[in-house]
Amino acid sequence: MKESRILDAQKAVYRPAFMEHGDSPKGTRHNNEETQSLRFEMITAHLLNDKEHNTIEDIGCGLCDLYGFLKKKKYKFTYSGTEIVEEMIEFTKQKYPELTICNRDILKKDCSEKYDFVVLSGTLYIPGEVSREEWKEFCFSLIRKMYDMCNKAIAFNFLTTHRTFTDPELFYLDPAEAIDYCLSNLSRFVELKHNYPLYEGTITVYKESYIQEKYRNPVFAKYFQPAK
């Protein structure tokens, strides 16, 4: 029941924004197109490319603005998304009929499908009527599930505690705590981007098998041995 209550709180955050602002960054609680595009760049630029065709699942995809952003690139990819606000889903299915958008709670559903990359942008920012501790627990559970669903890597962003501006409506996460969770529970192959203008960070967590494939020189083999 806890997850259902949290998802209901998320619908209460995002549905009114979409009903008021429609198909625009503000419709998904982004400030403007420039900051939204920068987030998308940080999330995807080091994952997708024009040489390999990859699948990418967007958790909390909203109006699939990430898909629109990626379509302008030369990347090879197949995009799908997960969203819980029904009005957003219906609108997006009309705008992008070629896409598969699922209305589901991935923490409850047995999501057996796998994607090369699973990403999340902006979804951890506004807890709504949920306590900060409960929201943090939910965020880490979501990140854990994303990692289970990926073949190669996950990427997500979060508002950082290292900032000069505070909005009581927003949720801020210590980058050290986020990195420690990923290193302790997911993988040692973790990357943090904290060097762009927004008050946030982007973390990418890679599967060991993906990193090992990139570093096939025998000299690196010893670094991929099971722990004794």
Image: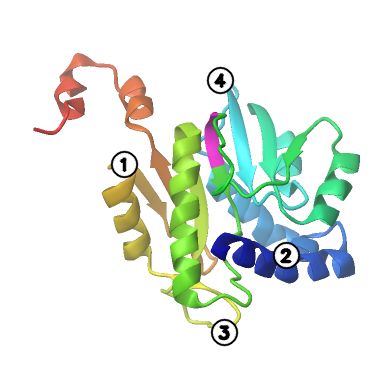
Q: Mark 1 or mark 4, which is nearer the start of the sequence?
A: 4
Amino acid found under the numbered disc labelled 1:
Ser
Q: Earlier in the sequence, mark 2 or mark 4?
A: 2
**Disc 1 residue crowd, few under 14, some 14–19, many 20+, Cα 10 Å:** some
User: How packed is label 2: few (under 14 Cα within 10 Å), some, or many (20 or more)?
Assistant: some
Residue closer to the observer: 218 or 154: 154
Q: Determine which residue is flagged by label 3.
A: 168
Residue at horizontal 43 percent and vertical 59 percent from the top: 194
Give the residue type at disc 4.
Glu
Q: Earlier in the sequence, mark 3 or mark 1?
A: 3
Task: Name the residue at the left extreme.
Answer: 228
Please provide percent x and percent y for residue 148: 45, 38
Give neighbour class at mark 4: few <14, some 14-19, many 20+ (Cα, 10 Å): few
The amino acid type, in three-letter code, at marker 2 is Lys
The residue drawn where x is 55% and y is 66% is 198
Residue situated in front as seen by the camera: 215 or 140: 140
Q: Residue 187 carries which label?
A: 1
Q: In this view, does 36 lie to the left or right of 110?
A: right
Q: Do the residues labelled 3 and 2 touch (CB within 8 Å)?
A: no
Q: Is residue 195 visible?
A: no
Q: Is the magenta stretch mostly helix, strand or loop?
A: strand
Instruction: Let me know if residue 71 is in the magenta part.
Output: no
Gap between marks 2 and 1, in whole Å? 31 Å
Q: What stretch is highlighted in magenta?
A: 114-118
Of the numbered discs 2 and 1, the one sitting upstream in the chain is 2
Q: How many labels does the image show?
A: 4
The residue where tag 2 is placed is 11
Tell me the CA gap for discs 4 and 1.
23 Å
Residue behind mark 4: 52
The residue tagged with tag 2: helix, strand or loop? helix
- SS under mark 4: loop
